[in-house]
Image (spheres, rainbow, N blue to C red):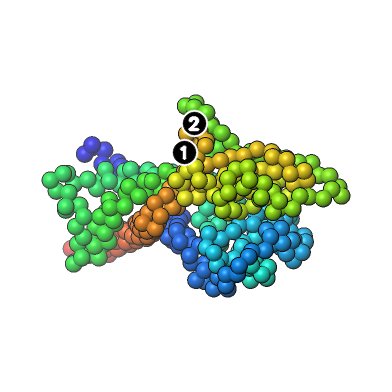
Amino acid sequence: MKKLRPLLLKLHRWVGLSVGLLLLIQGLTGTVIVFRDELDRVIHPEIVVPVAPTRIPVQQIFDTARATHPGETITRVELSRWDDGAALVKLTDPDTKALRLMSVDPFRGTILRDGGLLTWPMELIFQIHYTLLAGDTGETIVGIEGLALLFMAITGPIIWWPGLKRIGTGFRVMWKGNVDRRWRTIHRAGGAAAALLLLVSATTGVLMVWKEEARVALRSLGPVTDKPTPKVAKIPGQAMVPIDRLVARAKAEYGETPLRQVRFSSGGRVVAVFLDSDLTIRADGTKQIYYNAYTGDDLGHYVAGALPAGSEFIDWLYTVHTGMFGGTLTQLLFLLSGVSLTGLSATGLWLWYSRRRQKSRNRAARAAAVPVAEAH
């Protein structure tokens, strides 16, 4: 292993340098979005509303958004997990695919906030983290970053390992003296301390990017259930079943649990009702029921906690990646992971810059010393 360390160190440095700036962005955005819902309530206090005895129908929220932006496509209506939280409607422009978010008071039906990504900073940061605002191409780049981080999270502790008897020295930071030595020891100690969290974050992130490939691989081990993707042909002039009637049917047939969101696909002709799942311990686990918007026919379902192990594994990736699996404590741990990635990326880039600067100075000093030596 000692013979491999110089090679691993060189590879670790060059891989880190290649993606260092991108990982810095990932670290910064990841740190912020761990508590993005809570931060949204602070940044936009208007989305915290007085609680009233009854809520308006979901259909009314949908109709309000459609009337306000008739040329845009409504993709989902999200209900807040807080009683005093506004409902959030997501819309896209059919031509530019630009995202719009509208918050609506779920008790009074008034529009509280309405605008694109630039007016919703937490959603903007979320989109930067997951796609770099570059769609599928950006998501692929994020996946490559994840592979690079995975490599560094594995090789870093190997390079760092001081031996069992001297393990304490590996976490020692040289605060006094040379600035580069200080940052180098901070980088090494911080990387070793955060390696496990970064390993989990990188692994789950990579698998989320290539989720479909992961499903294919898992099928070789056992059954995997895909989410339904039903399509419904357009019927001109045909009325659609009210959304709330579909929600009521979902609760009657799949269990009376809280409604979390309603999604629309196939041109709005398929309505997916998302209820909390009481069959799983996963914090964001839902019962997803897909309906024909014209007839109300059940087109399929996908229920967390009642799926094959392969499907459950795939669905747990996001929960683990965001730190939601253990509540506030694990969210704080993954907040620390984001801070660590930010710090490691910044110190790694600094050490590379400092090393380059020192080499340049040394070359200049040697060049200046040559004429002096020849004169003698």
Label 2, label 1: how many angstroms apart (C-alpha)?
A: 9 Å
Q: Are marks 2 and 1 in contact (CB under 8 Å)?
A: yes
Q: Type of residue at label 2? A: Leu
Residue 369: image x %, image y %? 24, 63
Instruction: Tell me if residue 251 comes above or below residue 111 in the rendering.
Output: above
Residue at x 79% of width, y 41% of height:
233
Residue at x 46% of width, y 46% of height:
282
Residue 361: image x %, image y %? 30, 63
Q: Earlier in the sequence, mark 2 or mark 1?
A: 2
Visible in this render: residue 313?
yes
Q: Nearer the viewer, residue 344 or 218?
A: 218
Q: Is residue 369 left or right of residue 219?
A: left
- Tell us which disc is closer to us: 2 or 1: 1
Quadrant where the N terminus is found in the figure:
top left
Secondary structure at numbered mark 1:
helix
Q: Type of residue at label 1? A: Phe
Visible in this render: residue 101?
no
Q: Nearer the viewer, residue 366 or 92?
A: 92
Residue that numbered label 1 is attached to = 313
Q: Residues within 10 Å of mark 2 (few under 14, many from 20)?
A: some
Secondary structure at numbered mark 2:
helix
Residue 97: image x %, image y %? 68, 55
Q: Is residue 13 left or right of residue 213?
A: left
Residue at x 65% of width, y 38% of height:
300
Q: Tell me, for residue 218, which label it has, or none.
A: 2
